[in-house]
Image: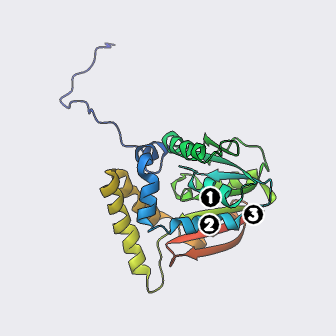
Amino acid sequence: MSTAPQSSSVPPSSETPAPRGGSGAMFDMIAPRYDLLNRLMSFGVDQRWRNKTVDALELKPGARVLDLATGTADLALKVLQRHPDVKVVGVDPSERMLEVGRHKVAAKGLTRVCELQVGDAQQLSFEDKSFEGLCMAFGIRNVPDRARALREMARVVKPDGRIAILELSEPRKGLLGPLARFQIRTVAPFLGRLLSGAREYRYLQQSIASFPPPEVFADQMRDSGLEVLRVTPLTFGVCCLYVARPR
């Protein structure tokens, strides 16, 4: 059989394939302005959401905390701001997001108590019952196999520990529901594209729209070995905080 290259009437594409939506490669492309865009698109309220997430962990001095989808380490730093006597390990699939996070951690002199590493929420490298607390902000909707990631959370957290998951959602009820949906479907993606020049922000609206309603996701958590303690809608249901512990 001949090994000579075959001719083709269609020239090969010189374009690099677009990264999968929600993948580490996609977030690599938007890392430099990720923090700024979060503040602008949420009108700064995302920091208040993070505070509630940290409070939900009910951490004690000396606790070890795992921050999944840590990105630029915003939530990891928030944990240390409110609990300077704990240690945090942040895991994320995007090396460029972690690079931004490491600069922020170093600038605050926290490298000794905050370690950031590349990793996959679906297959964690930690031993069973390694952490007293686990948090995840705006990341679970990007995980292809959510049930597997939830089972990993149940595995690595101690029985009396807390798991706090913060995630965006589309409000389906209430008088302000249409306004909140317009913000998520139109305003946020537009600002993302305008300020970053990245088409990847189209994925934002799509991923939020396809994420299950709070009650359905809470059932998924239960099916994955977690005891759901509470589900709290935030800011008219634009965001939800899920608090659980291993069952």
Q: Earlier in the sequence, mark 1 or mark 3?
A: 1
Q: Quadrant of the N terminus?
A: top left
Q: Which residue is mark 3?
A: 245
The CA span between labels 2 and 3 is 19 Å
Label 2 vs 1, first from the N-terminus = 2
Where in the figure is residue 163, as x and y percent of width and height?
70, 61
Query: Which tag is nearer the camera, tag 1 or tag 3?
Result: 1
Q: Residue type at mark 2?
A: Asn
Q: Nearer the viewer, residue 91 or 152?
A: 91
Q: What percent of the width, then of the height, locates residue 180?
A: 42, 76
Q: Which residue is mark 2?
A: 51
Which secondary structure, mark 2?
Answer: helix
Q: Residues within 10 Å of mark 2 (few under 14, many from 20)?
A: some
Q: CA distance from mark 2 to mark 1?
A: 7 Å
Q: Which residue is mark 1?
A: 78
For the residues bearing labels 2 and 3, Cβ distance under 8 angstroms:
no
Circle 2/circle 1 CB separation < 8 Å: yes
